Image (spheres, rainbow, N blue to C red):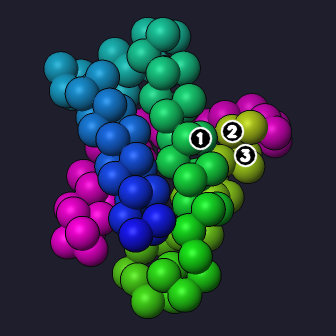
Amino acid sequence: MRNDIIIHKIMGYAEKILCYCKDVSVYDTFSSDPMRVESCVFNLSQIGELVSKLDGSFTDKHSEIPWRALYGLRNRIVHDYEGVNIRLVWELITEDLPDLRRKLADIL
């Protein structure tokens, strides 16, 4: 039950990010809007934080999701190791987040 609640929260943050970027189709538009970038980066960090609260048996069972990478991204964002790579954030949003959202929905 607890894992389901966490997954719902993760999906909520993913939805926010996708909503913030729904009218943006190119990197230059995204990267030139600091409020949008910061909102997305914040929500990505929240996803990573929530990933750390999932049970190990749950994440092992659903290995199709890159849990460690999500948590690792959170660490890079929060600790700002050499700055956040905005292009990587954009690629995650446009290439990986829709797939993550679909896989999380399948789990539920």
Q: Residue 84 in the image: x percent, y percent?
A: 67, 34
Location of the N terminus by quadrant is bottom left
Q: Quadrant of residue 38?
A: top right
Q: Which secondary structure is most common in the magenta stretch?
A: helix
Based on the picture, tell me whether residue 96 belongs to the magenta stretch.
yes
Q: Amino acid at mark 2?
A: Ile
The residue at which mark 3 appears reads as: 76
| Nearer to us: label 1 or label 3 | 1
Looking at the image, which residue is at 73% across and 49% down? 75
Camera-nearest residue between 94 and 49: 49
Residues under numbered marks 2 and 3 in contact, where contact means CB atoms less than 8 Å apart: yes
Q: Which residue is mark 1?
A: 45
**In the rendered image, the vertical position of residue 87 relative to residue 24, given as above or below:** below
Q: Amino acid at mark 1?
A: Ser
Mark 1 or mark 2: name the one nearer the start of the chain. Answer: 1
Residue 33 location (% of width, % of height): 43, 10
Q: Secondary structure at mark 2?
A: helix
Position of residue 48 measured from the top left corner of the image (x, y, whole percent): 58, 52
Residue that carries the numbered disc 2 in the rendered image? 77
Q: Could you tell me which secondary element the residue under label 1 belongs to?
A: helix
Q: CA distance from mark 1 to mark 3?
A: 9 Å
Residue at 37%, 65% (x, y): give it. Answer: 4
| Residue segment shown in magenta | 79-108
